Image (cartoon, grey):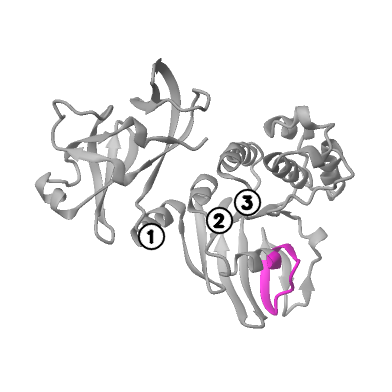
Amino acid sequence: MLLEVDLEKRFPGFGSRVKFTLTSSRCGVFGPSGSGKSTLMNMLAGLVDPDRGFIRLNGKTLFDSDRKINLPPEKRKVGVVFQHAHLFPHMNVRKNLYYGMKRRRSGGGDIDPGQLIAVLQLERLLDRRVTRLSGGEKQRVALGRTILACPDLILMDEPLTGLDGQLKYQIIPHLQRVFNEFSIPILFISHSLHEMRMMTDDVLVMHEGAVARQLTTEELARAEACTTGGGYINLLELDVDRDHGDLLSYRWGEVELMVVKSHAAPEGGRFSLSSRDILLFKKHPEAASARNMLACTVRNTYTTEWLVGVELDCRGNSLIAEIVPQSVHELDIRPGAEVVAVMKASAINRLY
């Protein structure tokens, strides 16, 4: 994807001035409420007319104030998934989905609806009225309807904000599978760093109507850990291995991790671990209550507001711990140094 944007828009009490070029197919727009995220999305979708500038998608001009070009939304091949699903209440799931196919333009691609329905796991819902769907199910249907129109770009405007934590993490794997399977570029708009890290590779950071920074999602995560004071959150993809009564062992690549058994089904998924729940030792402790002790090599270090981030290589896996500067000198933390990372089984929490 190639998206080139240079736009201005004035509202009473607020102005938007955005300029950027994107080549990533999984990009986010990040920032607090009122920073201009939705204004940008509405201009890209053709729902708000900019005052001046241009929008070019894959070489095609969608808007150009100098050339008097302003394609209507239905001709831009830009799909939108809003925070609220906006499904047709008088139609069942099947009819809502197939409505998207009616909006295809000639030469617009050929996504197999059966394949998409399977990826979104909507088979058992096809004959159900949309008024009887959960919030997560409605968003999956809205996404499917948008994809079946075969857009060149999908804008997702805070699509998970209205869902509670459990539903939010249930729908994210569906989103990931869809965009991996059908290779449709997305612009994912959110104020949630967790959502950004799971859905995007690159991010535009919005501030007061402008693009303040353009960086990778990982760079954003480390920067936010420095400024918010909450620490860095490691995201771990784990495969369930064995049951140990009150604990479960999971495989993290070649590493075994012990995790406290929860009410959720004992299966693999995405887990979180705070950088501040990891202790570093120079040698393997002789005895400790913590169930996880991993031999690691220091890759790199970086300074946060008052701590030092330590990037570790744990048999091919990446892990970040945060320690006080005094510990860096006492443990001789430097690239290539060998350490033992220790964390409690209860510190590793399931996201989905």
Query: How far is mark 2 from mark 1, CA to CA?
Result: 19 Å
Q: Are marks 2 and 1 in contact (CB under 8 Å)?
A: no
Q: Tell me: residue 298, above or below residue 214.
A: above
Could you tell which of marks 3 and 1 lies nearer the N-terminus? 3
Task: Identify the residue at horizontal 53%, vertical 74% (top origin).
Answer: 208
The x and y percentages for residue 78 are 73, 56
Task: Identify the residue at horizontal 43%, vertical 25% (top origin).
Answer: 261
Taking the view exactly as shown, the residue that stands out farthest to the right is 90
> Circle 2 sits on which residue?
28
Horizontal side of 31 relative to 229 (left or right) equals right
Looking at the image, which is closer to me, 58 or 176? 176
As helix, strand or loop, the secondary structure at mark 2 comes to strand
As helix, strand or loop, the secondary structure at mark 3 comes to strand
Residue 186: which disc?
A: 3
Mark 3 neighbour density, 10 Å: few (under 14) some (14–19) many (20 or more): many
Name the front one of labels 2 and 1: 1
Could you tell which of marks 2 and 3 lies nearer the N-terminus? 2
> Circle 1 sits on which residue?
228
As helix, strand or loop, the secondary structure at mark 1 comes to helix
Mark 2 neighbour density, 10 Å: few (under 14) some (14–19) many (20 or more): many
Query: How far is mark 3 from mark 1, CA to CA?
Result: 27 Å
Q: Which residues are magenta?
A: 42-55
